[in-house]
Image (cartoon, grey):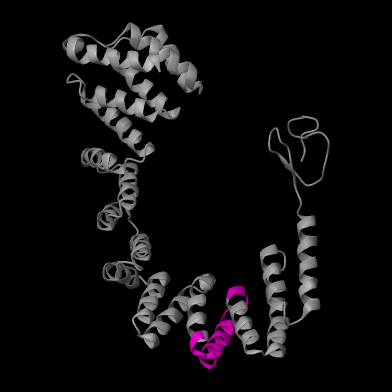
């Protein structure tokens, strides 16, 4: 704490008494300063802080040392101290353009770390205005606009850096997902952008809105469209479709639809599981068992998640089959068991008391 107070004092002297000297004096690089840079490179943060503190105590005009000291303090979590240093450094009139940018970037990062989004935005906007090709600056701005829920600005910035229009449409759909519950009218603007690029989730959101507004038939068609476009992610779209059908007791509509999807994508467990789930809720256990028995031959049975889902699907239909797949999960896990060295994190299949990689004894777990 004492050294932070001394830093503030030196800044006061620097700004009010010594700043006029800077334009006539070249930056010096004493051996102590070089030592501080070496400590930074080696990751010795505490040592680097102490060295840079000594440098600025002896040379209050060493702007590089002040800049690095602020950055180091940020890394140690002393963000308010880093902000003070970088803010004081930013008002020195003799800073070169390059130094001004370095200080601004440092201050912007301080605000990011302290989660002061509103203070960070104008700095990043200023930096981006000078360097509009810098993708990292643009990405930080998008993140900041998202934090403040300024979705229009976030989208406009994304429009500048996403070369692939599909990526931009996906981002528009992401924004829509954030707005759809509370700002439906605004969400529609971004949903439309996603739909134009045939983003499945955009169709899903549109269908969800239509059902909520009482346009059930239209909504269901768009839910189905999202599944058709993206069957691998059917688990995202099916629950809403099932929920609506169950509430209305319209098994007769959804069952043939799912049956058709199963025939189109025989290896898609998510769709198959939904179909079996419908049959179980209808009480048609024999049909559910027959579907499962036929389907498992088309599935990958070397994945614990698939085996677990199959066991769950058989539960209530065929208890013996359910336990059979539970046993297969256990066998698969035992077969794939790996051991890791706590020293070098090397993984091996069989236990050994001494790590074959780093030669450390008693480190295998």
Q: Quadrant of the C terminus?
A: top right
Q: Give the quarter of the image for residue 53.
A: top left
- Would residue 249 be counted in the magenta stretch? yes
In this view of the protein, can residue 23 be seen by the observer? Answer: no
Q: Residue at the spot x=48%, y=19% of the render? A: 46
Q: How many marks?
A: 0
Q: Residue at the spot x=43%, y=18% of the render? A: 49
Q: Residue at the spot x=27%, y=54% of the render? A: 150
| Up-down relation of residue 308 to residue 38 (above or below) | below
| Up-down relation of residue 151 to residue 250 (above or below) | above
Name the chief secondary structure element in magenta. helix
Q: Residue furthest bottom?
A: 252
Q: Quadrant of the N terminus?
A: top left
Q: Where are the magenta residues, as a range?
A: 247-270
Q: Residue at the spot x=41%, y=74% of the render? A: 204
In this view of the protein, can residue 35 be seen by the observer? Answer: yes
Where is residue 355? Give x, y as percent: 78, 34
Where is residue 83? Give x, y as percent: 32, 28
Where is residue 331? Give x, y as percent: 80, 61
Q: Give the quarter of the image for residue 353.
A: top right
| Up-down relation of residue 193 to residue 25 (above or below) | below
Where is residue 140? Give x, y as percent: 34, 44
- Would residue 252 be counted in the magenta stretch? yes
Query: Is residue 145 left or right of 230 when viewed as pictured?
Result: left
Q: Give the quarter of the image for residue 340.
A: top right
């Amino acid at each position: 704490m004492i050294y932070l107070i001394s830093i503030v004092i030196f800044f006061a002297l620097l700004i009010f008494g010594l700043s006029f000297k800077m334009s006539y004096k070249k930056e010096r690089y004493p051996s102590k300063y070089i030592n501080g840079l070496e400590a930074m490179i080696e990751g010795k943060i505490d040592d680097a802080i102490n060295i840079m503190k000594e440098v600025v105590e002896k040379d209050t005009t060493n702007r590089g040392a002040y800049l690095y000291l602020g950055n180091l303090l940020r890394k140690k979590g002393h963000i308010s101290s880093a902000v003070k240093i970088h803010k004081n450094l930013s008002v020195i009139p003799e800073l070169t353009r390059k130094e001004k940018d370095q200080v601004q970037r440092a201050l912007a990062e301080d605000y990011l770390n302290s989660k002061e989004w509103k203070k960070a935005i104008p700095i990043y906007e200023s930096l981006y205005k000078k360097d509009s090709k810098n993708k990292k600056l643009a990405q930080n701005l998008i993140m900041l606009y998202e934090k403040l829920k300024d979705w229009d600005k976030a989208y406009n910035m994304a429009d500048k850096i996403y070369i692939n229009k599909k990526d931009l449409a996906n981002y528009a759909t992401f924004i829509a997902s954030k707005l759809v519950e509370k700002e439906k009218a605004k969400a529609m603007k971004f949903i439309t952008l996603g739909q134009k690029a045939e983003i499945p989730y955009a169709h899903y959101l549109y269908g969800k809105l239509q059902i909520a507004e009482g346009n059930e038939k239209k909504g269901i068609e768009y839910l189905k469209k999202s599944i058709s476009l993206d069957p691998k992610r059917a688990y995202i779209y099916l629950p809403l479709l099932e929920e609506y059908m169950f509430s209305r007791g319209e098994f007769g509509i959804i069952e043939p639809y799912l049956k058709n999807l199963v025939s189109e994508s025989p290896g898609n467990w998510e769709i198959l599981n939904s179909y079996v789930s419908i049959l179980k809720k209808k009480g048609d256990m024999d049909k559910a068992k027959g579907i499962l028995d036929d389907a498992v031959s088309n599935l990958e049975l070397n994945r614990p998640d698939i085996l677990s889902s199959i066991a769950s699907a058989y539960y209530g239909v065929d208890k013996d089959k359910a336990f059979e797949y539970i046993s297969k999960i256990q066998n698969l896990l035992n077969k794939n068991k790996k051991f890791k060295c706590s020293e070098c994190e090397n993984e091996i299949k069989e236990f050994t008391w001494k790590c074959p990689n780093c030669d450390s004894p008693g480190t295998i777990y």
